[in-house]
Amino acid sequence: MTKKLLSTTLFFMIVNLAVAQRFDGGAIVGYNASQVEGDTYKGYNKPGFVAGFYVETDIAPAIFAAMEIKYSQKGARKKVTTKDPEKYIMRLNYIELPFYLAFRTNDRGSVLAGLSAGYLISGKEFDNYGEFIPEDQNEFNAFDLEPFIGFQFDFLENLKADLRLGLSVIPIRGKPVNTNYYWQNNQFNNVITLALYYQISR
């Protein structure tokens, strides 16, 4: 059912690009710097790839709305040092459907805020001995919901940079603890994304 929903969404995005002249659209490629809130490892040490497509349309003279579909790699990575050589990597691969509103601050810049729904394609963990076996891995949740804020800058006619920060509000999984605090019982994606947006259709 989820695959059918994603396929239908992509189809309508393509149709909008083709037949709705007031819509702009194009391709996305970029980079995630990720960490997981609720683990014991600090820092945006997990790199990841981002790629997809977007459509956008003006809804007021200085405001536009946009929707995307993209593949996004997230997770966490422990920094390995000579004093602490133990390795840990969490790799999470998502298909995401972000929606956002953006306000043009000038001819080139915009600030934005939105919400991204994600579906987990795969979730794996690794240490010095390789990939965790299923019995040793705490199961990941299939869905992610991530509010985000960001900034876009148009530096060429058909090319702009997008920088955004997102933090999940639905856990990626629970922790083997039992407290009265939602944020202490669970783990959440925390991601900084830098991407290029190339406009194909206007």
Image: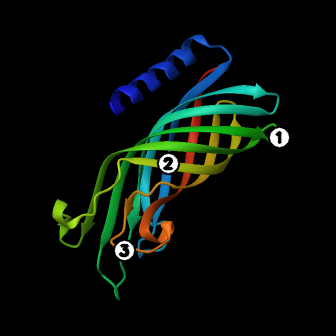
Q: Are marks 1 and 2 in contact (CB under 8 Å)?
A: no
Q: Which residue is at 39% across, 75% downward?
A: 79
Residue at 41% x, 76% y is: 40
Q: Secondary structure at mark 1?
A: loop
Residue 111 position within the rendered picture, expressed as x and y whole percent measured from the top left: 73, 46
From the image, tell me which residue sits under label 3.
177
Of mark 1 and mark 2, the one earlier in the sequence is 1
Q: What amino acid is found at the position of numbered circle 3 in the picture?
A: Val
Label whose residue precedes the other's in the sequence (3 or 2): 2
Q: Is residue 14 left or right of residue 7?
A: right
Residue 148 in the image, given as x and y percentages of width and height: 60, 50
- Neighbor class of circle 1 (other Cα within 10 Å; few <14, some 14-19, many 20+) is few
Numbered disc in front, either 1 or 3: 3
Q: Residue at (34%, 62%) from the top-left corner?
A: 90
Q: Which mark is residue 106?
A: 1
- Residue 191 is at least partly visible in this image: yes
Q: What amino acid is found at the position of numbered circle 1 in the picture? A: Asn
